[in-house]
Amino acid sequence: MDHPQLKVKILDDRVRRFDLPHYATEGSAGMDLRALLDAPLTLSPGECELVRTGLAVHIDDARYAGMILPRSGLGHKKGIVLGNLVGLIDSDYQGELMISVWNRGQQEVTLDVGERIAQYVLVPVMQAELTLVDDFEESIRGAGGFGHSGRH
Ligand SMILES: O=c1ccn([C@H]2C[C@H](O)[C@@H](COP(=O)(O)OP(=O)(O)OP(=O)(O)O)O2)c(=O)[nH]1
Ligand SMILES: [Mg+2]
């Protein structure tokens, strides 16, 4: 399979102490991202901090986007998720990948220097064109939503 190529820049030499983001197994969907921290970071319950990765990834192809997603272990067991819930990385973004880390739990959590705190997933994207119309051709669903399909 032809893999999309991502251009990666190391913005901070401390990143070199760790392995670069990579797919942990042949079938992994995401690459873990590590926290570039000066020292371990303790987040109180409810606290949210923007954490550096020291990496810039230029996707450079509008048919793709990057997504930063929580790691399930951290999210479920420790309550560490993302302040923006999901990070969406534009294909033309050339700045540092930043991770908004949110402690949504009830306990203090300490993140280690270089800890794998989130994951990066490359996803296909289609940019749409909008056509303004006066009316839609009626569908079976029509305007029903938000659980409408279960009702009689
Ligand atoms: O978790 C994230 C989310 C976004 N970004 C970067 C990459 C993305 O391309 C850019 C803009 O993100 P977004 O469009 O979601 O934020 P915005 O608030 O709309 O900012 P902008 O006005 O710059 O588009 O910020 C990150 O580094 N991490
Ligand atoms: Mg935006």
Image (spheres, helix red, strand yellow):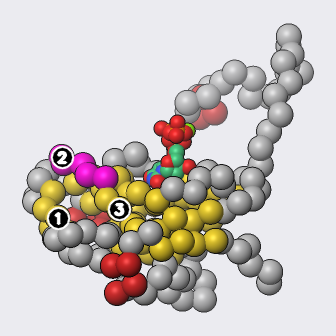
**Position in image of residue 132 (x %, y %):** 84, 18
Q: Quadrant of the C terminus?
A: top right
- Residue type at mark 3 is Arg
Q: Mark 2 packing: few (<14 Cα in 10 Å), some, or many (20+)? A: some
Q: Nearer the viewer, mark 2 or mark 1?
A: 1
Q: Mark 3 packing: few (<14 Cα in 10 Å), some, or many (20+)? A: some
Residue at 22% across, 54% down: 103
Q: Which residue is mark 1?
A: 41
Q: Which residues are magenta?
A: 46-50
Q: Mark 1 packing: few (<14 Cα in 10 Å), some, or many (20+)? A: some
Residue at 52% across, 82% down: 22
Q: Label 2, label 3: how many angstroms apart (C-alpha)? A: 19 Å
Helix, strand or loop at disc 2? loop
Residue at 31% across, 53% down: 50
Q: Label 3, label 1: how many angstroms apart (C-alpha)? A: 12 Å
On residue 46, the disc is 2
- Residue type at mark 1 is Leu
Q: Which residue is mark 3?
A: 52
Q: Is residue 115 above or below residue 110?
A: below
Q: Is residue 22 left or right of residue 15?
A: right
Mark sitting earlier along the chain (2/3): 2
Mark 1 near ligand 1 (CB under 8 Å)?
no
